[in-house]
Amino acid sequence: MCNVIASTKCAAISFILGAFLVACGDDSSTTPGIPGFGSELNSSEGSVSSSSAQKSTKSSDSRSSEHDADGWSSSSVNDVPQSYAEAKVRPSGTYDCLRYKCTTTEYLNQEFLEAGKYGEILDERDGRVYKTVKIGEQVWMAQNLNYSDSVQTPSLLGKNWCYEDDPKKCEVMGRLYTWVAAVDSVHGICPPGWHLPDNTEWDELFTAVGGQSTAATIMKSSSGWNDDGNGSDSVGFSGLPAGQRSNFGGFGCDGVCAFFWSASEYSSSDAYYVELYYFLLEGASLENLGKNNAYSVRCVKD
């Protein structure tokens, strides 16, 4: 209609312009914004345009995450994606921690964090986000696995625990798994595209950090260990002293040791694992013990 009326007439009869504002094509003042996106609409179909759907604006919502300074507008806490595969990634390359289960970064190498040296993986099975780090030619998870869905993965049933059965410990240290649960004859306990490292891959990591005799100092986190047993964490592996659960059901070694399963089998009853201790300031070793003990899991990329 406004294509017919001259612009001077539109100015003179402003009440007509207001009545036919939508017909004039100027609906920006009446169209509500779409959370997480710009408010631009496709002029021909009234749908969200593909370009505006990719834009992010700062949100004034007090529930925004700590990363809002990068320009991302977080959606509502209750705005959960229909599937975890619908990953919403911030411009900085990090996942929105209001939508996904981000593992605490308190014990990671803080210089690596600030410099953006950590990557990320989203475990689409449960929506948990882990930091990753490249060491030599390998890419490792920089945090312990914390996956426990025994419906999707039946081999987990009764074979994984939080330290002292405290869920808060899992949020920091990850879970403790028996070897059978960690290996899982179907596809392994690690997320798709990742796997439990075998002895050869652990040895490759030791070589990349200067050798097995000095690996512990470099692989241990720079905080969290008892009695000044912290490491340098100079490659970002950030090994935490998550402790272990014995095959008799007792928990121990929290703050003192870190045990990580290897996929390599020693015998029908025993398997290999990597151990780090607070009082061994340099060395790391591959040992073997019963498969019914429960240790931490670190995954390496396929």
Image (cartoon, rainbow, N blue to C red):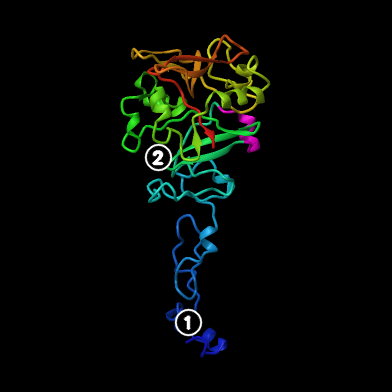
Expressed as whole percent of the image width and height from the top left, the position of residue 14 reads 49, 82
Which numbered tag is attached to residue 126? Answer: 2
Expressed as whole percent of the image width and height from the top left, the position of residue 22 reads 45, 77
Say which residue appears at 46% left-offset and 78% top-offset: 21
Element marked by disc 1: helix
Q: 79 or 164, which is in the foreground? A: 164
Which numbered tag is attached to residue 71? Answer: none
Q: Main secondary structure of the magenta part?
A: helix
Expressed as whole percent of the image width and height from the top left, the position of residue 210 reads 68, 21
In the rendered structure, does residue 123 fall within the stretch colored magenta?
Answer: no
Q: Is residue 293 above or below residue 68?
A: above
Q: Amino acid at mark 2?
A: Asp
Expressed as whole percent of the image width and height from the top left, the position of residue 75 reads 45, 50
Say which residue appears at 57% left-offset and 27% top-offset: 201
Q: Residue furthest front?
A: 268
Q: 12 or 295, which is in the foreground? A: 295
Element marked by disc 2: loop
Label 2, label 1: how many angstroms apart (C-alpha)?
Answer: 53 Å
Magenta part of the chain: 108-117
